[in-house]
Every structure is written in C-alpha cells, then in structure tokens.
Image: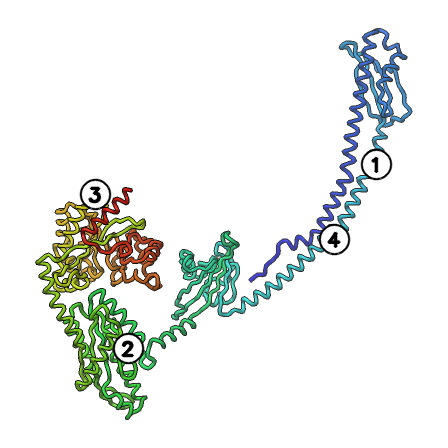
Amino acid sequence: MTMIQLPFTKRLENLPSQLKRLSMLFSLTIAILPPIGYWNIASKYKATQLAEHAEQAAHAVSKLVFINPDAWDLQFHHLGHIVEQYRPRTIETRIHVKDLNGEHLLLSESHSHYDWPISGSAEIKNNTLTVGHVTIESSQVPLLLKTLMVSALCLIVATGFLIFINRTSIRGINRASSEINRIHTELQQQRTYLDSILRSTENVAIIATDSDWNIQYYNDTTTRLLTPAASSLTGLPLFKLHADLWRNIQIVQMNKHAVSDNNTMSFIFTEVKQGHTHHLQVHLYEIAEGDSPPSGYTLLCSDITEQRDAAAMIERQATYDSLTDLPNRRLFLEQLERALASGYRHQYLGAVLFLDIDNFKNINDSLGHAIGDLLLQQVALRLQSGIRKEDIVARLGGDEFVVLLQEISSDENEAIKLTQLFAEKLGKTLAVPYVVRQHTLHITSSIGISVFPGSPSDQPGDIMRQADTAMYQAKDAGRNTLRLFLPSMQHVANERLKTLNDLRKGIEHSEFITFYQPQYDQNGCMVGAEALLRWQHPQKGLISPDNFIPLAEESGLIIELGAVVLETALSNLYSWIDSKQAPLSFQISVNISPLQFLQDSFVLKIKEALKNTSIAPSNLTLEITESVLLDNAKLAMEKIHALRDFGVQFSIDDFGTGYSSLAYLKQLSIDEVKIDRSFVRDILIDDSDAALVETVINLTSRLRLDSVAEGVETAAQFSFLKNLGCTRYQGYLFSKPLPLHEFKALLLSQKNLMSA
C-alpha cells in the first residue's frame, strides 16, 4: 500500500524564494508607481491652474479691447497692470501677451529660470473675433524636485518593507515549513507502523473503501482470505473483489434496522472454496460524523470456520450419543414435543417404540464392555437403516433405544396396525446374528409401543412413560415380543364410538348452531366475522369443535355440517346487510374441510348457496387448510380459480403449520393468510415464533395479500402485530365467538359508535 503523500509539502519548500520574488516586486511597485502618479497628477493640476489664470487675464484684456478696439495694443502700461492682477501668487510665472502676428505686446518677467516650462493659454477677443493671446507659463523644475523627494520617500518605504519581510515573514514561513515537514515525517512513520500492524493480522482481512465502495486500503490477509481476481486491489470496486460478500452487504444494508448497532453492522455468510465450506464473519463500519452521509466504509472479515465447527461439535456432543452417533434423550424429547404438536394440529397419529435388548448384560459380563459397545453400534446402524427418512432413532443409554414414528395415519386403528407391523419387522431385523470381532452374537429385543396424541394434554414425558411401561410388559410376557399401551387406546375408542352416535343424532335434531367471532382492522373497526360451528348437546351442553370436528371429518359427517354452516352464515349476512347493521363490504369467513372441498359438486354448491341468499360472491371468504393442497394440488387449484373467477375470496387457514405453504402460495389465487394462534400466542416471549410471524406478514405484504392473526388475546400482542403490518385481527382481545343474538347486538353497538 502506498504511503500517504502531503501534496502541499513540496510547494511549501519553494515558498520562501517565491515570497522573496513577490516582496521585491512589491517593493519596486512602491518605489516607482507613487512618484509617477504624483508627477502626472501635479503637472496636470498646475497646467489647469495656469490655464484658468490665463483665461481670467484674457477676459480682462478683452474688456479693454471692447472699450478701445483700435489702440488697445498701444496701452502697455494699462495692459501690464491688467494682466498682473491675474498672475498666480503661489508659483513663479511669466506672462506673454501677443497679437495675432505673434508679436509680443507685453512680457512680464519673473526671477525664475524657465528652461523646462509648463504653460496655460487663452484667446483675447473683440466680441467673437480673436485679436490676440495671453499665455502664463511656469517652470517644472520645482515640481520635479518634489517628485524626486516623493520617489526618495517611497524608496525608503519599499526598502523598509523588504527588510521587514526578510526578517519576519520569511523566517516564520521557514519555521512553519520545517514544522510541517516534521509532522509529515512523523505521519509517515506512524503510517508505516500502523501499516505493519494491520498487515500482521493474519486472521482478519481489513478493507477500507470510499463512499462509492472503491477500495482504498487492504492488508495481506485480504488477498488470502477473499481470493481476489486482481493482483492490485487499490481503486477496485468492492463487488469485483468478492461478489458474495457484496450481495450480503447489500442485504444487510436493506435490513439495517435489524442487524445494526449505531454505525456498525455484522453478519456471517458461507462460501464453498476448493470443495470446503468456510464461514466468514464480517463487521461493517460506516465512517461518518453525526448525521452526515458516510464518507467511507471499513470491513473486518475473519474466517470463523474453526469456531463454528467447534461450536457445532459441542452442540452435537450435547445432543448426540458419543458411542452410536444417534440422537440422545434430550434431542429425542425435543423432536417428540414437535411431533406431538404437529400431530395434534393435523390430526395425524404417531408412535414411540421403546426398545430394550434382552439379556444384554450377559454379553457385557462374558465378553467385556468393548464387545458390548461394538454390538450396540451395529444395532444402531440396523435401526437407522430400518426407518423412514422422517422418523428418528435415539439411544437413551445402556441397551435402551427409542424410535419415533411420525404421521403414520389419521385413522387410529390403521396407525396401531402399521406400528405393530413395523415393530415386528424391526424385531426380526435385530434378531439376525451379528459378527463382532469373530464372535457370532444372537440377540432379541422387547418393544413397548405408545401411540400419540391420545389427548391435547399429552406431554413427551407421558408418551415415554407409556412406551416404557409397555416395554416392561413385553419383558414380563417372556421377552422377544412387543406390547401396545392399551388403556388410552381403549378409552379413546369408546369415546369415539359414543361421540359418533351423538353426532348423527345431533344432525337429525338440529343441535348444531353457528357462532360468530368478529375480525377487526388496524383501526379497531369490525370488517368481518368468522362463522364457527358449535354443538349444543342436550346433556353435555355447548361442545367445542375440537371435540367433534375430527371425528366428523373421519366419518364423512363434516359434509353435512359444512353445508349447514355455509347456508346459515350467508343467510345471516344477508339479514345484517339488508337491515344496514353491517356495511356492504362486510366479510363472512367459512371454514371448508378437505373432505368437503374435494367433493365434485363443491364449486356448484358454493355458487348455489350464494345465489339462494343473494349475497355478492366478494362478501364470502372460504378458509381452507394446507392439507387440501397435499391431497390433490392440481384439482385444488382448479376449484380455487373457478370460484375466484366467480368473485369468491380464499384464505389459507393455520398458515405455517403445514408443508406446502411456500410452495403453493405464489401459484394459488388467494386473498389472505391466517396466522395460526399457536404462533401468535408466544410472539412476545418466543423469538422463533416472533420471527416466523414477522416473516409471514412480510411475505403476504409483498404478495399483496391480507394477513389475519388468530388468537390475539392481549393489547401487547395487538400492538406487536400492528407494528409488523398485520392487516386484520381476531381473538379474545376483541371478542370471543358469540351466538347470533349477541353478535347482532355487537354489530348494532359498532354501528351506533360509527354514527356518533
């Protein structure tokens, strides 16, 4: 890197000689110009003075001529007396009076010498006729002497000025120039020292740019760490140095509020170099004073691959078994917790298999722990090879293993059957003989099975205890077998059968009613409502849909229930709009089950329902879940497009809980996305949920879709969502789901409030 040069230093070195020349020139100017100016001004003034006196004398003589025009030139005494009156008194002069022939009529002498005269002349007139001239002249010698005196004085001043400049200013400038040269030398030394320090930082690339991102400085590590294409980087735009680095800087600057601290921004990006993955941490500093725009930027880039690998190793050691490289208990419980939540949301059953090797202690005692450890490693490999990609195998410790089977089936009987078949197959796989250091070993296993979720309150520990209990039942039954945890299964089966019978009776006796939960915009105005089905059971009272909708979907009764909700909601909406209780733009949202949506007559039935109730299609929003897209994406898109062309609006319900959201969101013609309450609930305490909700809202905003947050229960949640740009809100903060008469009263109160 070239050292800094001070461009004015060389000019300062030549400044004394330049100043000397300037001072000489100025001194000559002082010595010459004032005398010349004095001479010109004084001589002109004297000539003007003589001319004025000559004019006055000529005027007086002209009067004499007027009185005696024929003999005026003979009156010498009288003529001399007249012109003498007009002689200047301050200077020595001589007066000439001449006729037209040039002959002297009068010559008035003075005692001065007139070798170098200056004169003023005027005409003598008889009326308008010129008859002679009066001339007054004076010597210029006195004026010349005065001019010489002025010149001498100016010369003295110029000489004094020159002496002063040489003794003071030049000496001061010499001192200043020497001081600047000394500072320049010190700066160069400091720059060399700093440059050597920066170049010695082997693990940190240091780059300084101007405000246009052109490189002004870089150290040796830059060329090694960032592999530039050019040999010299000075003046090179940063994007030509490293395209990936430049893209990341642009992304960080777009999101400066989220990643910056004052004028500092930090980020990590990954690149693959020569087949190896490298992680680079970048600190970006803006060089700016106050609120002024940055005058440049400084980048510190360091390779943190080793640190990241070490952190990943520590994390893996904390979550993976060191012997088998399988997930340990901690990681398995985390995965089981997610599987429980997902299974409950999507109504899919999973299972935990608790596996214990029979009589493993005998192998350790007879052949040693080294052989036992090698056997456990082979068991782990067989377990991994026998599961699906989405399933998980973990080692709890000793000879205990667990298998997590996710989303086996939505039907419990089928899930149990498939799990038992899988467990039997797994047991047979493990029973195949092992060869460990020339020892042929035969083992069997006892397997306990727990199917989940049995209820919404199930926790990972509960499922593990159930599977563990079932495993010990298998051991008690003689080992080399499997057992299913039965009490919860039997209880659920009994409850399902009873609920299914009650459902059929409820449909026959019109026990199902529609509740309405209002939806509000950012200003707190009600803009729509969601129609929610409730079961008014004659003995159990009001039953939540969570307790009967899954069974209704499994049994097919959801089709009849869905038709009831749609017809009731549209009829009530017509009544509200017709009575002006609700505005013409009021939206009613109706949930559509996957089974209902996949009916061949679904599109036709929606159109008929709108026609029968005289509701504009744009007032209806159909809420579908992501599972609809999983079954038959092409057919789903065709139906959505058909109804949207008719004017019906669509909403993706429980967004973010499925698998196809991002894949189909852009392709589907939908109008809004509903953020699941499970994410809204913890947005103020869970950074992951907050980040996910923010991402969804930003995504919908970019796609020009409405975002509806479900389960808004506190003012803090509402404020947080509003700041993120969420457009509509639904939850207990505003209102719980209301029966028809209470909802109409709420509509009326809002109407009165708006009118006021």
- Amino acid at pointer 1: Met
Looking at marks 3 and 2 on the same chain, the residue that comes earlier in the sequence is marked by: 2
The picture quadrant where one finds residue 187 is bottom right
Q: Which residue is mark 3?
A: 580
Answer few, some or many: residues within 10 Å of disc 3's Cα (few below 14, many 20 plus, some between 14 and 19): few
Q: Is residue 638 visible?
A: no
Q: Residue furthest bottom?
A: 366
The tag on residue 171 is 4
Closer to the camera, 78 or 308? 308
First in sequence: mark 1 or mark 2? 1
Q: Quadrant of the C terminus?
A: top left
The kind of residue tagged 2 is: Ala
Label 3 to label 4: alpha-carbon separation? 96 Å
What is the distance, in whole Å, between disc 4 and disc 2 at their CAs?
Answer: 88 Å
> Which label's residue is closer to the chain start, 3 or 4?
4
Q: Nearer the viewer, residue 503 or 294?
A: 503
Residue 310 spot, x, y in % from top left: 41, 74
Closer to viewer: mark 4 or mark 2: 2
- For marks 3 and 1, give the CA distance: 111 Å
At 22% from the left and 49% from the top, the residue drawn is: 745
Dot 4 amino acid type = Arg
Graded by Cα atoms within 10 Å as few (under 14), some (14 to 19) or many (20 or more), the crowding at tag 4 reads few
Left or right: where 203 falls relative to 500: right
| Residue 302 image position (x, y, % from top left) | 46, 67
